[in-house]
Image (cartoon, coloured by chain):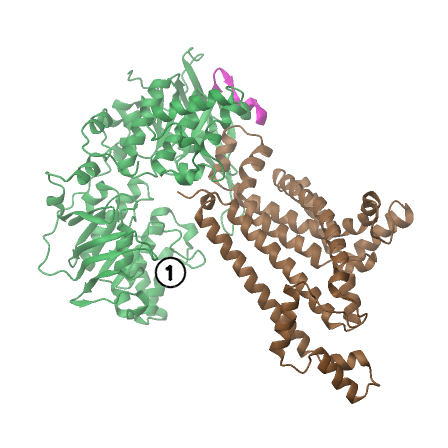
Chain colours: A green, B brown
Amino acid sequence: MADKQPKPGQPKPGQPKSGVLLDIRNLRIEATVYPPGEAPKNIVLVHDVSLTLEKGKVLGLIGESGAGKSTIGLSSMGYGRGGVRITGGEVILNGRDILKGGNEGFRKLRGREVCYVAQSAAAAFNPAHRLMDQVVEAALLHGTATRAEAEKRAVALFKKLSLPNPENIGERFPHQVSGGQLQRVMTAMALCSEPDLIVFDEPTTALDVTTQIDVLAAIKDAIRDTHVAALYITHDLAVVAQVSDEIMVLRHGRLVEWGGTRQIIKEPRQEYTNALVSVHEIEHQEQKPGTSPFLSVKNITAAYGRSHIKVLKNVSVDIFPGQTLAVVGESGSGKSTLARAITGLLPPEQGTVTFDGRPLANRLADRPKEDLRQLQMIYQMADVAMNPRQTVGTIIGRPLEFYFGMRGRERDKRVAELLDKIEMGKGYVDRYPAELSGGQKQRVCIARSLAAKPKLIICDEVTSALDPLVAHGILELLLGLQKEENVAYLFITHDLATVKSIADSIAVMYRGEVVRYGAKSTVLTPPFDAYTDLLLSSVPEMEIGWLEKAIKGRRMASAGN
Amino acid sequence: MSSPIVKLVAQRIALGIILLLAVSVLIFAGTQILPGDVAQAILGQSATPESLANLREQLGLNDPAYIRYFRWLGGILTGDLGTAMSSGQDIATSIKGRLWNTLFLAFWAAVVAVPLAIILGLIAVRYRNGWVDKLISGLALASTSFPEFFVGYVLVFFFAVQHQWFPAISTVYDGMPFGERIQAIALPAAALTLVVLAHMMRMTRAAILNVMQSAYVETAELKGLSAFAVIRRHAFPNAIAPIINVVMLNLAYLIVGVVVVEVIFVYPGMGQYLVDHVTKRDVPVVQAVGLIFAAVYISLNIIADIAAIVANPRLRHPK
């Protein structure tokens, strides 16, 4: 693979060579935004970005949210989400400028020359139609195949993507197939009309880490065998390093750095790229468990409704003052259900939760206010965890009024202190949640839970929806607050890098059971049980060739497949 | 068909029957609470106390209310709706022809109104927020905003008086040829169509617009489907449940709410019959018609519920 390095932001001089499939020149994309209480204004999402992609090659587009990755990817299909408009530059596909073709031209190339694989296949498939009808739709529409040919091709692709039951899976409806499988069916759908280019828009981000690795391997094989070119959009450098020939780093709609995969991850030339490459590690020295836990979960079994399927089976964990217990596992393993059982939202069928030496009432409604105060929660989606019509001051002030009866100046003073603690300052008191960034929203949620002065904060995937650099800031904040306030965390996550950064002890959950539990150093030291091994070996590493090695070395297949 | 659907459908039907029984109690109780004595009403002011007492005995009016209710209900279940006080005719016989007339009118109004409303809704979504959308919405809302009698008389003025294409009075009789019958009901059917059109059109538009935000609609657009194909193939099937609901509500209105239109066009349907007998204080007829209207309303809503259940692929094809 060539390690070429064109100058960022400048198109290559001269006519494109015959091998060039996509040539984007000086692309400029704008959108109209409607800020609350202000006049609508135009903002520029993509500033003067140029790129070229040769036939059969994969270019990774990477950056934080708002970097313009998806917007650039969709521009190769002439598509703008919402009110997004392409206002400048050229998009030359197969030698012609597609922006000159108008709507009719866009329709002819979408689904034929360029196909799209969305982030959440579960949402991107129409729930009303069978998978096969959706997979062959584009090929039939553009007349590239008869129905029989297209179905034959689809079944061959299902096989190639190692879907179970390739002959019959097309007869199923989207809700009858798991998320990881749907993502592969969507890749088959994109490949079915034999396009020249596929835009992969975060195709594995919504999947569990153990499922991601299989889907990633399937996508990589399919790209190699069909010689299709691809734009691979993701925020995860380790993932993109496995599939791309070249990587383009974007930030705020501008090009930061563009180069071969090895150069970007081994010798980044820009400071921002360097920050992305080295973001993960926070050195966190584990604390020895104290003598007595203040919260103790003993043999809890729980189910939803009158179902016979137990979501928690005989789960026991201890939490020590001022320490962090991380609960890891894939979706459906019972992590969040454990949090619901501890908080009383889902009364357990068996087992007890002991707090400060006395049992807690099973049901939320039976717990006194004081018990409620001691256990607080922070959620993954900070946006929906706050009332959009309340200001930051009201949101943080509410627990102060509710638990401590604070009013007026006393409350305002405490709110200001809490805003200082989360490094935001009292200038934010009158802001509404919609005016905050994702990271700031999560900080406000942290301040709200701290306001109750709890002994334990349950953090449910609090950094999962955030960009890596922002998530990093949140983790450092949480660690700092733990030292100052001596608060304990029950930290639910599927991300092992986060676990390493924050945990003192770890519980690994699998299908409702705790399969491995102990101090961080013990849990993360071999020998591993089969599931922990799978989990640990599935975390993408920023190393070329990691994917092949990891697939080869596995002892157990993922359950989410 | 799988078991969860059968169970849900059985539940809906059982609920409907319970509801209908509750309505029958209310109708019966309502007519009991009304002032006036049936025997007195039949015999008039000059009746002697003896003849009143005899008639009461004969009609069973001296029995307790619950016995009279069960007697009435039992009669209905065996097809005996009782006898009209004003004319002495069997209610079931008089209703039969009129119910058929009402259903005939409602059916043809629905045949025009439902597809028209849905197609207009689809077109409004295709050209959303453009002038076509605004024109469709504006005209439909205007036609709904005018009262039915006004719409009816305007139609009569233009199409019966000025142009004489259709009769102003919708007379129908047994053995009337189909073509003539259709011509006779053209104007009332048009009036009904105009009244129900906007509600169904607006609801279709809103339900589809709601679905247009979905990721799978974007997927369809990115396959290169034309805007109308996206709406028809990908948005419409997922908006079907709310659309069926509003269609059924309007069908119910076409049967139950036609009173004014029937009176304007002197059409011999249920509405006319009901109005005639309310003015004559003919309680058995009012009870019978009320119960039939309730049954129509409840069954159409059950059909809407069942259609919404069946339209859901998650219920139709469980994991």
- Against B262, is A213 above or below? above
* Depth check, front residue: A305 or A39: A305
Q: Amino acid at mark 1?
A: Ile
Residue furthest to the top in view is A18
Residue furthest to the bottom in view is B49
* Depth check, front residue: A417 or A62: A62
Left or right placement of residue B43 versus residue A45 in this view? right
Left or right placement of residue A433 versus residue A147 in this view? left
Q: Is residue A200 magenta?
A: no
* Depth check, front residue: B280 or A68: B280
Q: Is residue A102 magenta?
A: yes
- What is the tally of numbered marks visible in this picture? 1
Left or right placement of residue A33 versus residue B102 in this view? left
* Depth check, front residue: B136 or A322: B136
Which residue bears the numbered disc 1?
Answer: A395
The quadrant in which the N terminus of chain A is found is top left
Q: Tag 1, which chain?
A: A
Q: Tell me where residue B47 appears, x and y as whole percent.
A: 82, 85
- Range drawn in magenta: A91-105
From where the camera sits, is residue A313 visible?
yes
Q: Residue at x 10, y 54 (%)?
A: A289
Local SS, label 1 = helix
From where the camera sits, is residue A99 visible?
no
